[in-house]
Each structure stands twice: as structure tokens, then as C-alpha cells.
Image (cartoon, grey):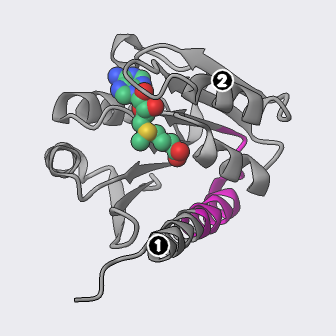
Amino acid sequence: MNEITKEDLFIFHKLDDLMYWGILKIFMEKIQAHNGCKNMTEFGINTGSGSNKFLDVNPTCNYYGYDSWEGTNASAEAIARKALKKYPNATIFKQRTDILKQLPTKMDFVYVDGGHSTEDCLNDLELAKNNITEKGVIIVHDYFFHCVFKATEDWYQKNKGEFDREQINLHRGWMIFWRKEK
Ligand SMILES: C[S@@+](CC[C@H](N)C(=O)[O-])C[C@H]1O[C@@H](n2cnc3c(N)ncnc32)[C@H](O)[C@@H]1O
């Protein structure tokens, strides 16, 4: 049997990263065309690889990122802070999202990629719903993770009157919610 080599793994990681970048770029452009995307928030910054990509596409967007950095790699927070330094309109909040009631402003785009338990994901979807603009968009990453899938489906059953949705079966799954226009 041919074993997977270190070189194979290197290529898989590169392809994975390219796919993540590609999807984020496409959606950032779509959301910008849809509602102008002046303000966005990300639940779960980690090392800031996603946030950097959002801001590369739309550098004038006001970005509000939340992460508790509990139990992550010790250097993740420092890497994120360094990476986001070049964007003066990026604000980082070191806190859990389950204690939040309100965001600093209404958001055109919320990226849900924080806690992956059912409770955390449901909390973040509710927070997103209550803090988006009339043409706001919510994206759930890692939709294929069991708890994220369950939370997203339960939440959608209660909120389908308010959102159209699209599913992308790439890079651990994405669910995109477009707020229905009134
Ligand atoms: C999958 S990573 C985020 C990846 C990032 N969005 C990206 O694109 O590179 C999940 C992050 O969520 C954070 N997190 C987990 N539970 C959280 C909570 N309840 N409140 C805030 N952040 C949380 C973790 O510390 C971790 O850094």
C-alpha cells in the first residue's frame, strides 16, 4: 500500500487553505455587492486567518471580532492581533459570545465560527439574527460538524420565514443565510 507522505499532507493543507480563501473571497464580494458591507463581525477569530481574508477583499469594512481564546494554542491571540494590526478599522474583543446581548452596531455580515457546541452555535445565530441590518447576511462555517449542523437546522426551522439559505458542500460545509427583504 502506498502511504500518505509528508509531501502529500503539505499539498492537502495548501489546497485546503486555497479553498478556504477562495470561498471567503467569493462570499465577501457577493455580500459587498448585496448590501455594501460597511460593518461585519466574526465569532471566533483564532489566528485571524479568516479575518485577514475578509479585510483583504474589503479593507474599508469595520470589522468586530470576538474570541475568548480559552483552550486554543497559546500563540493564537498574539498572531491574530499582529495580523490585524494593519487594519485600523478592525476591533478585537477578547470575550465569550454567550455573555453578549448586543453588538457595537448593526452588522451587514456575521460570520459564525466560534464555539462549535450546539449551545454556542445557537447562541451565536440568535445574536447574529438580532444584530443584522435589513439586508444582512449570516454565514455558518463548519456546518457539517454534528453539533453545528444540529444547531443550524433547529435555528432555521424557527427562522425560515425570515431567511433564504444556500448550502455549500465544501471545506467542512457552509450555510449562508440571506435575510429576506420586506
Ligand atoms: C474554528 S476557530 C475560528 C477560525 C477563524 N474564524 C478563521 O477563519 O480562521 C474557533 C474559535 O472560536 C473561539 N471560541 C470558542 N468558543 C467561543 C465562545 N463561546 N466565545 C468566543 N469565542 C469562542 C475559539 O477560541 C477559537 O479560536
118 and 15: which one is in front? 15
The disc at residue 25 is none
62 and 165: which one is in front? 62
- Residue at the image position 29 percent from the left and 88 percent from the top: 2
Residue stretch rendered in magenta on the structure: 21-39
Figure disc tally: 2
Q: Residues within 10 Å of mark 2 (few under 14, many from 20)?
A: few
**Residue occupied by mark 1:** 12
Based on the displayed image, in which of its 4 quarters is residue 89 positioned? top right
42 and 165: which one is in front? 42
Q: Which amino acid type is shown beneath numbered disc 2? A: Ala
**Helix, strand or loop: magenta stretch:** helix
Q: Quadrant of ligand 1?
A: top left
Q: Residues within 10 Å of mark 1 (few under 14, many from 20)?
A: few
Could you tell me residue 28's position as x and y percent? 64, 58
**Residue occupied by mark 2:** 78
Q: Which amino acid type is shown beneath numbered disc 1? A: Phe
Based on the displayed image, in which of its 4 quarters is residue 119 positioned? top left
- Residue at the image position 63 percent from the left and 28 percent from the top: 64
Cα distance in 3D space between marks 1 and 2: 26 Å
The image shows residue 105, relative to residue 34, as above or below, that is: above
The reply to whether discs 1 and 2 touch (Cβ–Cβ < 8 Å) is no
Could you tell me residue 57's position as x and y percent? 76, 57
The image shows residue 173, relative to residue 147, as above or below, that is: below
